[in-house]
Image: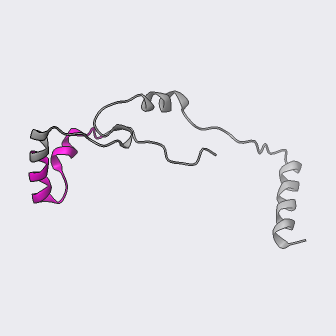
């Protein structure tokens, strides 16, 4: 047996001896996640902010002077919901 296998067997023996529960616990707040997924607005869920032609020129001026669009940044909520990109498992 490999050293790794022996350590696993030893660990499981200790858990069994001390009756430690090794079941998975789901710490997700599913109600909050569902509520966040329903949010709509500029930048919510990581979606693109759409601008009108008038707004586009204002955005471009801000981009030219700052290197990012402060105009668009101001339209996005500070506490916006972003998509959860973690693996489901």
Answer with left or right where residue 65 lies relative to residue 40.
Answer: left
| Residue drawn 49% across the image and 29% down it | 34
Q: What color scheme is it?
A: one colour
Instruction: Verify whether residue 60 appears in magenta.
Output: yes
Front residue of this view, candidates 22 and 39: 39
Answer with left or right where residue 12 lies relative to residue 33.
Answer: right
Front residue of this view, candidates 56 and 11: 56
Instruction: Verify whether residue 54 appears in magenta.
Output: no
Q: Residue furthest right?
A: 1
Q: Could you tell me residue 65's position as x and y percent?
A: 9, 59
Q: Main secondary structure of the magenta part?
A: helix
| Residue drawn 53% across the image and 48% down it | 86
Answer with left or right where residue 41 lies relative to residue 65.
Answer: right
| Residue drawn 34% across the image and 30% down it | 40
- Highlighted range, magenta: 58-78
| Residue drawn 48% across the image and 43% down it | 84
Answer with left or right where residue 46 lies relative to residue 32.
Answer: left
Q: Which quadrant of the structure image shows residue 25? A: top right
Q: Which quadrant of the structure image shows residue 67? A: bottom left
Front residue of this view, candidates 24 and 18: 24
Q: Could you tell me residue 38's position as x and y percent?
A: 42, 28
- Eyeballing the image, is 71 above or below 11? above
Q: Could you tell me residue 69's position as x and y percent?
A: 18, 51
């Amino acid at each position: 047996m490999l050293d790794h296998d022996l350590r696993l067997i030893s660990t499981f023996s200790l858990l069994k001896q001390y009756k430690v529960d090794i079941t998975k616990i789901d710490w997700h707040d599913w109600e909050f996640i569902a509520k966040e997924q329903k949010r709509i607005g500029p930048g919510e869920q990581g979606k693109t902010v759409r601008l009108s032609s008038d707004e586009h020129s204002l955005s471009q001026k801000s981009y030219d002077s700052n290197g990012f669009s402060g105009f668009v940044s101001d339209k996005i909520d500070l506490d916006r919901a972003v998509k959860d990109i973690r693996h489901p498992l």
